[in-house]
Image (spheres, helix red, strand yellow):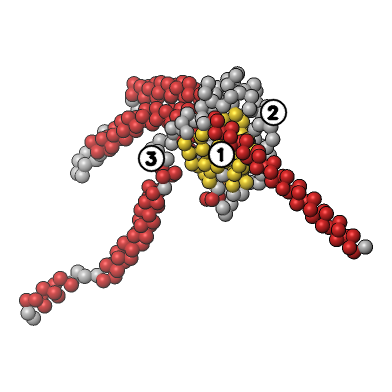
Amino acid sequence: MTPATKWITRASAGYDAAALRSRRRTTRLLIAPAALGAAMLVLLALAPGAMADVFTPESGGSPNADDIDSLYKIVLYVSIPIFLVVEGALIWALVKFRQRRGGPEPEQIRGNQPLELGWTAGATVILVVLAAITFLYLGPIKDPPASDADGLAAGVQVASVDQPAPPGGAKAPLTIQVNGQQYLWRFQYPGGRDAYSYYRMIVPTNTTVILKITSSDVAHSWWIPKLGGKADALPGHTNQTWFKIAKEGTYKGQCAELCGDGHADMRSVVKAVSPQRYQAFVARRQRELTDSQKALAQQRREREGASKSGQGEDN
Ligand SMILES: [Cu+2]
């Protein structure tokens, strides 16, 4: 036997082909879920809507969205040090007081009254403070303020059935009816005759806009992230939310309730324009509606005339 073959024989003595194969199979089995997890993380990171403002809610369009964002940040910033202290103490204790190989069994401790009283009282204080701050923010998030002096002039809004006297007195809010239907949003504007639009809602700046939200088929959810939280659109029920946009611009959103095949197409845009441009838009929509109604009536008359003359020929 040459030295080389001797070495190979010795090296392969402990070789177990079956064991190697099973280890390879386990690795292969682990790769699939790991790859799936990584792919999901990448997809999440690529979807800005899912990440919102990365760690906090989107804001910047309306005061209620800003308040939701501030409240979220306050709770987050209080939670981060608590998380670090608790997890840090846990890991430190696990490492420092672990049983060492060959060493004695670590000391067994049961209860520590001052410590337990301390963290119970501490947690209570933190919760009470957070609750008080939350209640301070809830009012401005929930209750619509008055429109600004340079908002849409009062008197344009319609009276609503279930709402108490609109806040703001002279600078009353503008109420828009929002109707979700598979797979689009319909907006009905107030003011005399009907004016409506689909997909894109036009609103005046510096004006409190109250939305009355409902659905004509299944459950949908109205959501323009920068303009505040979600509001369910349910058949047979009217939900209410509001926003007030200070600067002209476009705010995008989408239905936030899986409502069927076309759910992903059920997007929406709120476009804020000056009160003058808003009024011009509503007037134009009304004119278009009147014109199309006239055209329809004309067609109907012509059809009736044609069928009458047709009948005349038959006789
Ligand atoms: Cu929907």
Mark 1 surroundings: few (<14), some (14-19) or many (≥20) residues within 10 A: many
- Element marked by disc 1: strand
13 over 236 or under it: above or below:
below
- Whether residue 5 is visible, yes or no, is yes
166 over 21 or under it: above or below:
above
The one nearer the camera, 221 or 250, is 250
Q: Pointer 3: what residue?
A: 54
- Element marked by disc 2: loop
Label 1–label 3 contact, CB within 8 A: no
Q: Pointer 1: what residue?
A: 201
At which x and y percent is residue 14? 19, 69
Q: Decide which of tag 1 and tag 2 comes sooner along the chain.
A: 2
- Relative placement, left or right, of 226 versus 15 is right
Q: Residue furthest left?
A: 3
- Whether residue 75 is visible, yes or no, is no
Q: Amino acid at mark 3?
A: Val
215 over 191 or under it: above or below:
below
At which x and y percent is residue 266? 55, 48
The answer to which quarter of the image holds residue 187 is: top right
The one nearer the camera, 176 or 141, is 176
Q: Amino acid at mark 2?
A: Val
Of tags 1 and 3, the one toward the viewer is 1
At which x and y percent is residue 113? 35, 22
